């Protein structure tokens, strides 16, 4: 980001290439509609571009990027209510050759998706930031404005609920 701030346009391309997949999945799994996710995703990158001259590295770029996404999602949720997209066939792993294993995997994925959708919003966000964004507890806390203990608890409770939902099958 510092290179981009100094006028290196190729640095932006590097940042985008490095972060777009995880960030998009994070946003997509945080809202119901693919179109809404695409709009929010684009808005994150617009804000990155607009903040180029003001950027001051106080944490990893990833933390700063997910803070922007968190703030946009919070604004979206305040306007539209809280929801999470269900996993669709495009996001599922390839089915194994064994039909029984394939059916069991689909059932487990369905239970996981339902459990993820049923998580309280702050737990869901902590889980997605950790799994999709690769953020640490400290980075989740920084991105969401929570303290580290709260971020750690949210992630721990989310993991326990998701594990329980998958194991109960």
Image (cartoon, helix red, strand yellow):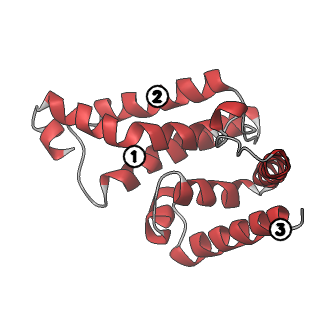
**Could you say which is closer to the camera, residue 117 or residue 139?**
117
Neighbourhood count class around disc 3 (C-alpha, 10 Å): few under 14, some 14–19, many 20 upward:
few
Residue 2: x %, y % from top left: 16, 45
Tag 3, which secondary structure? helix
Q: Can you tell which of label 1 and label 3 is closer to the viewer?
A: 3
Q: Is residue 110 left or right of residue 18?
A: right
Precedes in sequence: disc 3 or disc 2: 2
Tag 2, which secondary structure? helix
Q: Residue visible at 45% across and 49% down?
A: 66
| CB within 8 Å, label 3 to label 2 | no
Residue 156: x %, y % from top left: 66, 73
Tag 1, which secondary structure? helix
Q: Residue visible at 48% across and 41% down?
A: 23
* Quadrant into which the C terminus falls: bottom right
Check the image and report above or below for 47 versus 132: above
Check the image and report above or below for 39 versus 123: above
Precedes in sequence: disc 1 or disc 3: 1
Most distant residue in the front direction: 97
Most distant residue in the right direction: 169
Mark identifier at residue 43: 2
Check the image and report above or below for 110 versus 157: above
Residue 83: x %, y % from top left: 76, 40
**Could you say which is closer to the camera, residue 147 or residue 125?**
125
Q: Residue beneath label 3, please?
A: 167
Q: Residue beneath label 1, please?
A: 65
| CB within 8 Å, label 1 to label 3 | no
Neighbourhood count class around disc 1 (C-alpha, 10 Å): few under 14, some 14–19, many 20 upward:
some
């Amino acid at each position: 980001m510092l290179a981009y701030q100094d006028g290196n346009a190729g640095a932006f391309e590097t940042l985008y290439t490095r972060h777009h997949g995880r960030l998009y999945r994070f946003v997509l799994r945080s809202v119901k509609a693919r179109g809404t996710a695409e709009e929010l995703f684009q808005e994150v990158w617009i804000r990155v571009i607009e903040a180029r001259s003001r950027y001051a590295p106080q944490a990893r770029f990833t933390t700063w990027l997910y803070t922007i996404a968190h703030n946009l999602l919070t604004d979206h949720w305040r306007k539209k209510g809280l929801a999470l997209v269900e996993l669709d066939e495009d996001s599922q792993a390839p089915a194994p050759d064994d039909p029984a294993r394939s059916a069991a995997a689909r059932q487990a994925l369905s239970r996981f998706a339902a459990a993820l959708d049923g998580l309280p919003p702050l737990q869901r966000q902590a889980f997605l930031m950790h799994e999709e964004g690769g953020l640490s507890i400290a980075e989740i806390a920084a991105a969401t404005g929570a303290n580290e203990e709260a971020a750690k608890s949210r992630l721990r409770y989310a993991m326990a609920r998701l594990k329980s939902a998958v194991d109960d099958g």
